[in-house]
Amino acid sequence: MKGVNQSTTLLKEREDFIYCKDGCQTDTFRCDAESVSGAVSQRACVYCGARVVLNPITDAFHIVHGPIGCASYTWDIRGSLTSGEELYRNSFSTDLGEQDVIFGGEKKLTAAIDEVASLYAPKVIFVYATCIVGVIGDDVKAVCKMAEQKHGIRVIPVMSPGFAGHKSVGYKMACNAIMELIGTEKREKTNRINILGDFNLAGEMWIIKDYLNQIGIDVAAQITGDASCEQLMEAGSAALNIVQCAGSMTYLAKRMEEEMGIPYVKVSFFGIEDTTHSLLRIAQALGNEEALKKAEMLCEIEKNKLQDFLNKYRKNLKGKKAAIYVGGGFKAISLIKQFNEIGIDTVVVGTQTGKKDDYEIISQLVNPGTVVLDDANPAELETFMKQKEADILVGGVKERPLAYKLGIAFCDHNHERKHPLAGFIGVKNFIKEINLSMNSPVWDYIRRESL
Amino acid sequence: MLDLTPKELSERSALRVNPAKTCQPVGAMYAALGVHKCMPHSHGSQGCCSFHRMYLTRHFKEPAIAASSSFTEGSSVFGGGSNVKTAVKNIFDMYNPDIIAIHTTCLSETIGDDLNAFIQDMDIPEGKIVVHTNTPSYVGSHITGFGNMISGFIKHLAKSSKQSNGKLNILPGFVNPGDMREMKKLADFMGASYIMLPDTSGVLDAPMTGSYEMYPKGGTKIEDIVSMGDSELTLALGELTCEAPANELKRKCGVPYSAMPLPIGIEATDAYVMALSHFTKNEVPYEIEEERGQLVDTMLDGHPYFHNKSVAIYGDPDTVLGITALVLEMGMIPKYVITGTPGETFVKKANELFEKAGVIGCKAKAAGDLFELHQWIKNDSVDLLIGGTHGKHIARAEDIPLIRAGFPIIDRYVHSYMPIVGYKGAMRLVELILTALMDRQDRDCKEEDMEMVM
């Protein structure tokens, strides 16, 4: 932990996970490691990671095999929108009880799958194996295989015991399940692309698809925002994969590259710079000159359309200070750029599951003095946001009340986002939202202790 | 629309669809947050802790702190002993609570971790306390976990010195901070000297000050929990939630208890007030009589609009029974009452309420789910839904107004500050019910039937 002014006791074990950009190298900075026992971590588990990736598949059944909690906490929480089925917004589980724990839950799981099959005509069922399933000796893979044969449908196990790592491991398990579904069978190639790592929160997938449509690029499969099983099966025909949420989907992109020969590029549709760059990059990667021209034109027009808006808000926002605490590295990177575009300085930035590469890019983007931290806890966020006098925090559900308590404005860039934040329209929504939060008249009524 | 529920009822033996409960640990975490300077600790995988904090934060719109043992593959094989020992040391070093309240999870229970042994083996700093409870997620529900955590505090801390402290213990049930404040207000009006455990008021409804307190002002003090063993009586409000911990205290310290329904509605609040009066030997003061009279007044004012309307109530057992009692007092028909929490006592008590009020054709079910409730409604609808957020799919699909009461409410604000207990809480429910039904009438009636004065 270099250059960080410690005004509170930080755990020694946590020191390597925090540093302050002061020109020095980041050799000793650690990330992508297990959380310290006893830390009030903001991180989730393998099951959570797997569930959030697969949940947006709108016509799939998601049966959570375990005691009720894991199903309850994830019932319709993602904010992924659908243009088709609403099936995924229900909660299905085996609700294991004491007897099942003693005698095993295989029978109950088999019966639960049978009951789903008799209630509906499912195309695909994902079965999530939670913490205790392996411990009580259930062979979930075998149960799924038998159910496939019995019902003539896909029943895909998602091996996601919570203890097997943090969210990233769950992403991987979800990617494996997707591969299992789409298969590696050779398909006739088309010029279409797959979108990986957008979950259609507040309809963002639709915005991205609309841009692609405007520049003449068709989409084969959306993985997984507003996806349907049928559409996912088209994935093999794509010429290119574009990967937005790199933290969750790079693994799948790599597998698809190796096993299906589909190359991939990383993209991000947050902020003008990254949206523009991504659209051009896609056209280039496809070698599609016409699309490239159209993309240049589209971005130019959209960017120009935003100028008056940006000028108006820049006056309000210039010189403000932002803190960022999000799930993956790609989002943090886009947000820093987006803040730079409107003259906001990022003073604290952290992620739950960012990788070394992400932190290197982050380090290049931020100004000296910025605190960078991995897997932060509320006490650390509080310390550094206060120390760096942040005006706004961008984060997820657990960070919102913390920011408010500190008298700091907040924008949810996670499952509870209020508007689409992707694309050019997203720039507008994002800036409006942070401006709104920072300028609420209610802040003026806080009686601060220092008064 | 969000309407995948088939009308035809079918037998389900294994599949749980759209649950009306969640698992024990989140209840334990909530109870532990109601103890002053307490760090709840989840002994299991990191996700449990994260989900529970998220769930509580979504309901209370407040930070909910808790630490985790952060199990790994290794701990799931060799046990979580070293994880929890490291965790406890780290928590005291870093967050400096006075007490750590550990609860278990399905994983640590299944692998057979012995928390008692682990705790005895720990180096606990002088003056600091570690307590625990067992909360296997595959037994009961979050309500069970809430009760178990209270029992855990009592087991570890309450002591009998054989000298009465002259106080009354109040176990408030799984209710909001706003409810706990209302219960305390009535106890204050009655001049009772009491200890409430847990008490999340001042913790999960702490005021905005511009600074973040990891341990806000509220919460039951440790010395008060110790002293509960010297109290003269325990009122266990919410029989299905709080009788077990009250009994634990009786067993350990010989404090007698009286288990009562949650004070929701007139009669249950009367019973609570009379119990307080009996304990303090004080007459019921005018302030309380006035509130009661105002409640009855408003119920009479509005009765033409709610009398004989049918309602479906779902959620936690004691809350659902309380609301059922209130709507019966109002002359409404609680056609369906369900809880996800298992236990046939719920059904028995609901049936007793139906019988006493002389209503027929009402159905009660424990260990039910919202999918089944939806099926019942599809076959024979109701005028109103009362429960937590998760009924909103049914409300929308069937176009029935929904009043949010209970836990969890993750799509509205302010509710956790407002009571549904006591006469004031009942009045609030009456207003919510009236407004929902009358707004609906204004929306649905023919233009020529639209009335300015109602």
Image: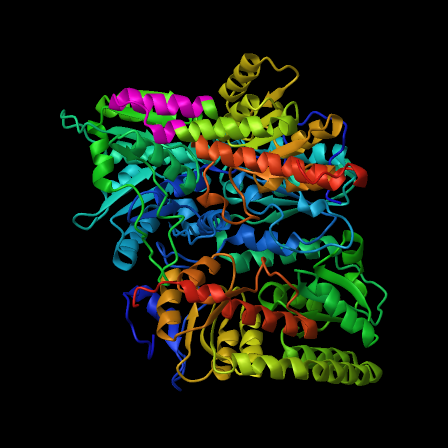
Residue B208 placement (x, y as % from top left): 39, 57
Q: Is residue B270 magenta?
A: yes
Magenta-drawn segment: B267-289
Indicate the quadrant containing the C terminus of chain B: top left, top right, bottom left or bottom right.
top right
Residue B161 placement (x, y as % from top left): 14, 28
Name the residue at 33% across, 57% down: B213
Whether residue A103 can be seen here: no
Name the residue at 50% across, 23% down: B343
Lateral position of residue B360 relative to residue A189, left or right: left
Whether residue B116 can be seen here: yes
The count of marks equals: 0
Name the residue at 86% across, 65% down: A188
Lateral position of residue A293 relative to residue B122, left or right: right
- Name the outermost residue toward the front: B453
Indicate the quadrant containing the N terminus of chain B: top left, top right, bottom left or bottom right.
top right
Query: Vertically, is A273 above or below A446?
Result: below
Question: Which residue occupies the foreground of this view, A32 or A275?
Answer: A275
Question: Which residue occupies the foreground of this view, A125 or B218?
Answer: B218
Question: Which residue occupies the foreground of this view, A84 or B425?
Answer: B425
| Magenta: main secondary structure | helix
Q: Is residue A63 magenta?
A: no
Residue A304 placement (x, y as % from top left): 71, 84
